[in-house]
Image (cartoon, rainbow, N blue to C red):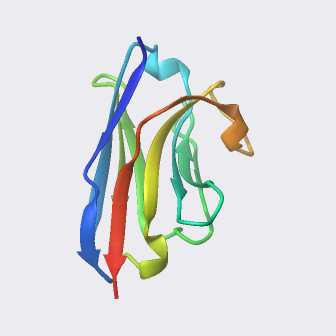
Amino acid sequence: QVQLVESGGGVVQAGGSLKLSCAASGIIFNSNAMGWIRQAPGKERELVAAMSTGRITNYADSVKGRFTISRDNARNTLALQMNSLKPEDTAMYYCAAYKYAWSSHYRTTDVRYWGQGTQVTVSS
């Protein structure tokens, strides 16, 4: 059974930092591109960051320079370091395993497995 379990969400003031983690089991972790996708109330899900099996990264323009995605294939974990957080970063953040190893354009419809999500709330 595939499981993606996120942790690390919480409430933080604007300008603060949080680190999200995702522990994967039941999949061949180093065969899948992995990503973080978020959904704010009333909005569609959007890609935050993704990393291919070859460690090529893609970031949403809104988080470039502030967020860093990383993966540890030996431990089957994915992380998202979030710095200089803004109120508009408030959302549910989901860990995602894609159907492929790499893409130039990661789509939410290409996610094979989803985590249950962890809430990030940034207060102004």
* Coordinates of residue 88 in the picture (x, y in percent): 49, 77
Looking at the image, residue 104 sits to the left or right of residue 42; the answer is right
In the displayed structure, 25 sits above or below 5; it is above
Q: Residue at x 37, y 75 (%)?
A: 85
Q: Residue at x 58, y 72 (%)?
A: 62
- Residue ranking furthest to the bottom: 124
| Depth order, front residue of 101/21 | 21
Q: Residue at x 25, y 74 (%)?
A: 12
The part of the image, by quadrant, that contains residue 92 is bottom left
For the C terminus, which image quadrant?
A: bottom left
In the displayed structure, 15 sits above or below 7; it is below
* Coordinates of residue 67 in the picture (x, y in percent): 43, 63
Looking at the image, residue 94 sits to the left or right of residue 73; the answer is right
| Depth order, front residue of 99/115 | 115
In the displayed structure, 81 sits above or below 30; it is below
* Coordinates of residue 104 in the picture (x, y in percent): 74, 43
For the N terminus, which image quadrant?
A: top left
* Coordinates of residue 94 in the picture (x, y in percent): 46, 45
The part of the image, by quadrant, that contains residue 53 is top right
Q: Residue at x 55, y 45 (%)?
A: 50
Would residue 82 be seen by someone viewing this image from the given angle?
no
Would residue 71 be seen by someone viewing this image from the given angle?
yes
Looking at the image, residue 104 sits to the left or right of residue 83; the answer is right
In the displayed structure, 3 sits above or below 105; it is above
